[in-house]
Image (tube, helix red, strand yellow):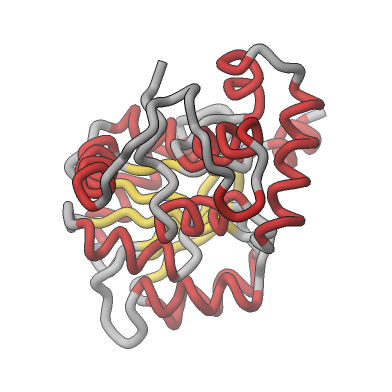
Amino acid sequence: MDGDRAQRKTRLLLADDHAVMRTGLRMLLNAQPDMEVVGEAMDGDEALVLARQHRPDIILMDISMPCCDGLKAARRVRQEMPDTKVLILTMHEDKGYLYQALRAGAAGYVVKSAADIELITAIRAVKEGGVFLHPMVARDLVQEMLSAADWKHEFGKVEERPHGLSPRELEVLRLIALGHTNQEIAEILVLSVKTVETHKTHIMEKLGPRTRSELVRYAIKNGLLGTLREQ
């Protein structure tokens, strides 16, 4: 029974060059009933070695580390261990770093000044296949997208079908990019979860991306967030 419970826990690897930071994170995360820290690394190179050894579900990765920084390590993890997610945990509240993190394959971006509950929420969202962006960084990102283009259509009145997507598929893609789970998308659009999953499969077939993180990067790169307003 105890072994079964342990297997259901989210296995985490911490990568940060500050020992005090790692100690605090380890105490916080091991106190959660559904999480356990399986290793700690002080730089990107060590993170890769431990990731290969432990195959964690998620790596909490700092950006600024010696030897191999977090972004380079994230790219290596994505190439070598596609089942392991990378959640960036950094002091940088900067859209530039966010763009780089998404390009590197990160599934989430949390700043160290955030409350503990935000980090816990981010870990659980990423574990379930979602994408988590620190609210302030995400807000600035969406505002930038809104101001960068001439948005002529209001939500629900989209006349064009960019990239070969149907209007419904476009709605699903935007909600995925905003970090909603399949269940949440189903509730927002009044669909079944199975229908949402079918739309997501069709989106991936048309666009090429194979993961939620890649869909988010695609939506940002192609300016597809601007015509959607949260309900």
Residue closer to the observer: 110 or 163: 163
Q: Is residue 185 left or right of residue 104?
A: right
Q: Is residue 225 left or right of residue 32?
A: left
Q: Residue at x 78, y 26 (%)?
A: 195
Residue 112 showing in the rendered view: no
Residue closer to the observer: 38 or 92: 92
Q: Residue at x 35, y 50 (%)?
A: 109
- Image position of 112 with respect to 125: above or below: below
Q: Residue 110, position in %: x, y?
A: 31, 46
Q: Residue 187, position in %: x, y?
A: 61, 14
Residue 208 showing in the rendered view: yes
Residue closer to the observer: 44 or 172: 172
Quadrant of the image containing the N terminus: top right
Q: In which quarter of the image is residue 60?
A: bottom left
Q: Residue at x 59, y 30 (%)?
A: 181
Q: Residue 210, position in %: x, y?
A: 69, 59
Q: In the orientation shown, which residue stands out farthest toward the bottom?
A: 67
- Image position of 197 with respect to 230: above or below: below
- Image position of 142 with respect to 92: above or below: above
Q: Residue at x 68, y 63 (%)?
A: 208
Quadrant of the image containing the C terminus: top left
